[in-house]
């Protein structure tokens, strides 16, 4: 017989984004009001589950947090409990599976089920805890919008607003100084933030991981604009963009992160190259970096976060453990975690299976139709 769920634990893992607090709000209020279930929030992602650091969540503690970026529970992009880094006495590191300790902690705290909010890496561990017999429901999150199992993730819309606002600001200074402005945005291996942000912010060139570029084509575009009397150019570069025949630029490897590669710096490289190839303009580089992850949550992300949170509780209480909530069209549905992440092996995250921009798709075609260059 299935155990009755009386207490739920929430985990927010991986890189933060706007809308996480809306999900926490939705889960806590629905659990308490609709089902009379207790809620606790583990702090700093899976680390809290291992170290037993948590805070009880009641109606008062989640009141007034809907609009705030980040997560009141804090987050961590490390702490894969199935491959956990510990330091030996001699200072070297070893990796261990400490997931049984986490399961013991859940028993000790009387927590019957988990709702895990995260991206690829975090949801892979959620699946692995489900395989260990813990009732788990997943909620997809990322600013990159690269999870194939949902039409869109919360956090993405707020980041797009930030990028659009930044591009509007960069436009005026680009115009005043006749400059070429290179603006790098996040997105990992998916160009969605660059594409939709660039479209909304009237970029002249958009460089995506999905469409390798030729630097000479970018120079051509700048010259075309000059000939047309537009003496400035805005280039939006996804952090995962790469030249034809070249490689992505890796900023950092974080060994104990479920997804260890951090991209970044390609915008700076392009700006350097352009400043050598173009004498008519000064070239400037801006990396929007972490401002894309913060700020006041947009209406869309508040609503989606709230809907995901409430539906995650319903799913759990209606026997849907082992699944993740997803948005399909305008409806919240769900999908098994097994189909969402990983290659099947415990602790292994999905490899490069992210949702990417279709180089021949409607967005790219529309952008080309209005004269935007993709550098190819
Ligand atoms: O996946 C979200 C994301 O913000 C990426 O766009 C970015 O490459 C990465 O996380 C940055 O991660 P970190 O917070 O570890 O620097």
Image (cartoon, rainbow, N blue to C red):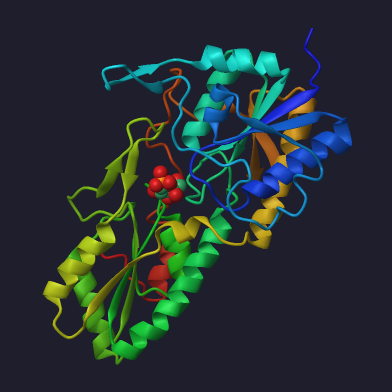
Whole-percent x, y for residue 256 in the image: 37, 30
- Which one is in front, 374 or 171? 171
Percent coordinates x, y for residue 233 in the rendering? 31, 79
Q: Is residue 376 left or right of residue 320?
A: left
Q: Is any part of residue 125 visible from this angle?
A: yes
Residue in the picture at 32% in, 51% down:
240
Residue 193 on image: x %, y %? 45, 58
Kindly indicate the quadrant of the structure image that contains residue 279: bottom left
In the displayed orientation, state which residue is furthest to the bottom: 229
Residue 273 image-quadrant placement = bottom left
Q: Quadrant of residue 350?
A: top left
Q: Tell me what residue is drawn at x 53 percent, y 47 percent.
A: 16
Which residue appears at 63% of the width and 45% of the height?
A: 72
In the displayed structure, does residue 127 sit left or right of residue 170? right
Q: Position of residue 67 (x, y in %)?
A: 68, 58
- Judging depth in this view, the residue of 352 and 6 nearest the camera is 6
Above or below 140: residue 279: below
């Amino acid at each position: 017989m299935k155990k009755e769920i009386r207490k739920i634990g929430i985990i927010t893992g991986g890189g933060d984004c706007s809308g996480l607090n809306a999900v926490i709000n939705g889960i806590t209020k629905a659990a308490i009001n609709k089902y009379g279930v207790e809620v606790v929030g583990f702090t700093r992602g899976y680390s809290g589950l291992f170290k037993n650091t948590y805070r009880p969540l009641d109606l008062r503690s989640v009141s007034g947090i809907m609009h705030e970026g980040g997560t009141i529970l804090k987050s961590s992009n490390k702490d894969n409990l199935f491959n956990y880094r510990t330091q030996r006495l001699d200072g070297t590191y070893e990796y261990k599976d400490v997931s049984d300790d986490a399961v013991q902690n859940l028993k000790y705290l009387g927590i019957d089920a988990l709702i895990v909010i995260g991206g690829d890496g975090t949801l892979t561990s959620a699946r692995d805890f489900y395989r260990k017999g813990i009732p788990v429901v997943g909620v997809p999150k990322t600013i990159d919008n690269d999870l194939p199992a949902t039409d869109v993730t919360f956090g993405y819309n707020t980041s797009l607003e930030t990028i659009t606002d930044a591009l509007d600001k960069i436009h005026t200074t680009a115009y005043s100084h006749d400059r070429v402005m290179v603006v790098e945005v996040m997105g990992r291996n998916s160009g969605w933030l660059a594409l939709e942000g660039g479209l909304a912010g009237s970029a002249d060139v958009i460089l995506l991981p999905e469409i390798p570029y030729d630097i000479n084509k970018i120079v051509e575009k700048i010259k075309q604009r000059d000939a047309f009397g537009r003496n400035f150019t805005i280039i939006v570069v996804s952090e995962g963009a790469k030249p034809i025949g070249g490689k992505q630029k890796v900023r950092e490897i974080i060994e104990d992160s479920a997804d260890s590669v951090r991209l970044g710096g390609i915008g700076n490289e392009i700006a350097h190259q352009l400043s050598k190839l173009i004498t008519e303009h000064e070239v400037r580089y801006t990396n929007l970096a972490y401002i894309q992850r913060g700020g006041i949550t947009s209406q869309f992300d508040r609503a989606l976060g709230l809907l995901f949170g409430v539906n995650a509780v319903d799913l759990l209480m209606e026997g849907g453990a082992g699944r993740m909530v997803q948005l399909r069209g305008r409806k919240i549905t769900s999908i098994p975690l097994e189909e969402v992440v990983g290659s099947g092996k415990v602790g292994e995250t999905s490899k490069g299976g992210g949702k990417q921009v279709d180089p021949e798709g409607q967005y790219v075609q529309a952008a080309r139709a209005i004269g935007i260059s993709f550098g190819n």
